[in-house]
Image (cartoon, rainbow, N blue to C red):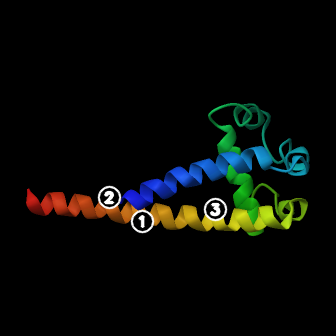
């Protein structure tokens, strides 16, 4: 359980670092209309929603098919190779971490129910 929380903290730090290292070519090309609504551009510019924008772009970079709905399928071509690899590692880590957290939460609920 402690490992999952430590991994979550580490993921937050990595995502914040990737936020500041996001290539401006990606933001200049895709962070505007028609890919995002004007309200979304205003919302995802400031704190606390700017890292959400980064995660959306990380997902589109790691898996170009996931950006199909917004038309962000070529974002992976605008970033360096290391950013693309790191994006894939972050997305897989988020999936694994979320699954482990759900298992721990459900397990704790079952344990509590059986002890009660």
| Residues at circles 1 and 2 in contact by the CB criterion of under 8 Å | no
| Dot 3 and dot 1 residues touching (CB under 8 Å) | no
Element under disc 2: helix
**Mark 2: few/some/many CA within 10 Å (<14, 14-19, 20+):** few
State which tag comes first along the sequence, 3 or 2: 3
Does the residue at mark 3 contact the one at mark 2 (Cβ under 8 Å)? no
Residue located at (43% from left, 54% from top) = 5
Reading the image, the residue beneath label 3 is 90
Q: Nearer the viewer, mark 3 or mark 2?
A: 3
Query: x and y percent of residue 94 in the render?
Result: 56, 61
User: Which callout, 1 or 2, points at the residue further toward the start of the chain?
Assistant: 1
Instruction: Answer yes or no: is residue 33 visible.
Output: yes
Q: Secondary structure at mark 3?
A: helix
Q: Residue at x 70, y 52 (%)?
A: 56
Residue 103 horizontal side relative to residue 19, left or right: left
Q: Quadrant of residue 60?
A: bottom right
Q: Position of residue 83 (x, y in %)?
A: 78, 61
Looking at the rendering, which quadrant does residue 37 occupy? Answer: top right
Residue at 47%, 61% in the rendered image: 98
Earlier in the chain: of badge 3 and badge 1, it is 3
Q: Residues within 10 Å of mark 3 (few under 14, many from 20)?
A: many
Counting from the top left corner in percent of width and height, residue 6 is at 46, 55
Residue beneath disc 2:
105
Is disc 1 surrounded by few (<14), some (14 to 19) or many (20+) residues within 10 Å?
some
Q: CA distance from mark 3 to mark 2?
A: 22 Å
Residue sticking out furthest to the left: 116
Near-viewer residue (9 or 30): 9
The label shown at residue 100 is 1
Residue 92 appears in which quarter of the rendering? bottom right
Answer with left or right where residue 113 lies relative to residue 103.
left
Tell me the quarter of the image containing the N terminus.
bottom left
Tally the numbered discs: 3
């Amino acid at each position: 359980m402690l490992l999952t929380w430590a991994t979550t903290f580490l993921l937050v730090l990595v995502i914040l670092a990737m936020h500041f290292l996001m290539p401006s070519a990606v933001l200049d090309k895709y962070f505007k209309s028609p890919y995002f609504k004007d309200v979304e551009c205003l919302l995802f510019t400031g704190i606390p929603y700017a890292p959400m924008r980064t995660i959306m772009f990380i997902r589109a970079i790691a898996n170009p098919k996931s950006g199909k709905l917004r038309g962000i399928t070529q974002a992976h071509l605008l970033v360096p190779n290391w950013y693309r690899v790191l994006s894939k590692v972050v997305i897989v880590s988020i999936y694994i971490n979320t699954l482990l957290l759900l298992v721990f939460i459900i397990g704790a609920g079952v344990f509590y129910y059986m002890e009660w």
